[in-house]
Amino acid sequence: MDVSIIFPVKNLGQKLSEMIPYISSQITSFSSELIIVDMGSSDATVATALRLLRQEGLTGCVIQNGEVTPAEALNSGIHKAKGKYISFLFARRLYSGVLSEYYHTAEHTDADLVFGSMTEAESRTAERQSMSRVVKKKQGVDYMKACLEGKLYLDIAALLLRRQFLLENQIWFVQECRYGYAEEFLYRCLMRGKEIVPSPVMLKRERGLELTGPSPVPVGKEIFQETEAMLRVQDILWCEHSQENDLMELLTCQRIPAAVMHGIDVLLRNGYSHSVVRAEMKKLSYEKLLKIGRYTSADLKKKIRHWKSFWHHYFPSQL
């Protein structure tokens, strides 16, 4: 089996009737399996998925996981997967024409992780790297630094990963985490991958097929799971790449405080009082995470200073 595609779903109903034939059309150049992981659907999602797998002649299965987080559903898919490579599919982010190119790149380079190009410049660089041994290959921490600096965008929905790489390094999604789980997983892969390879293929969304509308899961204090995810990334960086000072400062003075401020903003926008948010910050000892340094953006500096000095008058819409 070449590629296992893991697709977490919940209450997609007839939307699957559009998505699965589309997926089938994207995976004709290699052997594959489609692992659909249901997260407690209350509609006909499971029956529809089973019918469409048979109708499209696809190898695969439907796993009924009950009411679980997307992270837990993805882990179930990894456990079940038999492919040499793994890719993740999400109903809200569908990319067209990438898997065949990713598979070709992975087989050519023995990559642990393959990702696509967002711009023509990235595509040209990836093509030069694939054609020439003179072009210096970047390490995973280099790509992680570019992500944290906002110079590179990697989407968990547009990756190809070598399954044995994940198993050997015990890289899994943190099951109880709803916010930040994908970014944490990605950084774990980048910090431990030996062959991180960009593909020249340009990423293009299939927006007409994607699920739209607000997420049905209400956002509450769980939003601070994003901060906890970045703190776990920081711990791994300390242990495995302690010499990466710039990367550590980016995490400490930009990404982690940005996650904290994002949590504050979300709670205030969802009706939590300033005193409740302030109390939660104290309980979690998050005030000490609001550090400012040379990598802190101007907007984030403004938000942090405003919160620290006038937290009872802080409103996200004002900044």
Image (cartoon, rainbow, N blue to C red):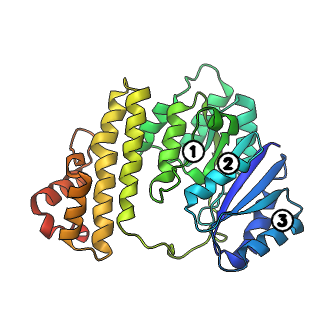
Which secondary structure, mark 3? helix
Relative placement, left or right, of 10 versus 306 is right
Residue at position x 14%, y 56% from top?
Answer: 308
Q: Nearer the viewer, mark 3 or mark 1?
A: 1
Q: Position of residue 287 (x, y in %)?
A: 20, 51
Height in image: 303 above or below 202?
below
Give the side of residue 147 with respect to residue 118, left or right.
left
What amino acid is found at the position of numbered circle 2 in the picture? Ile
Amino acid type, callout 1 = Trp
Left or right of 232, for residue 155 = right
Image quarter of the N terminus? top right
Looking at the image, residue 201 lies above or below residue 271: above
What number of labels is visible? 3
Verify CB contact (< 8 Å) between mark 2 and mark 1: yes
Q: Is residue 230 left or right of residue 37?
A: left
Q: Which mark is residue 53?
A: 3
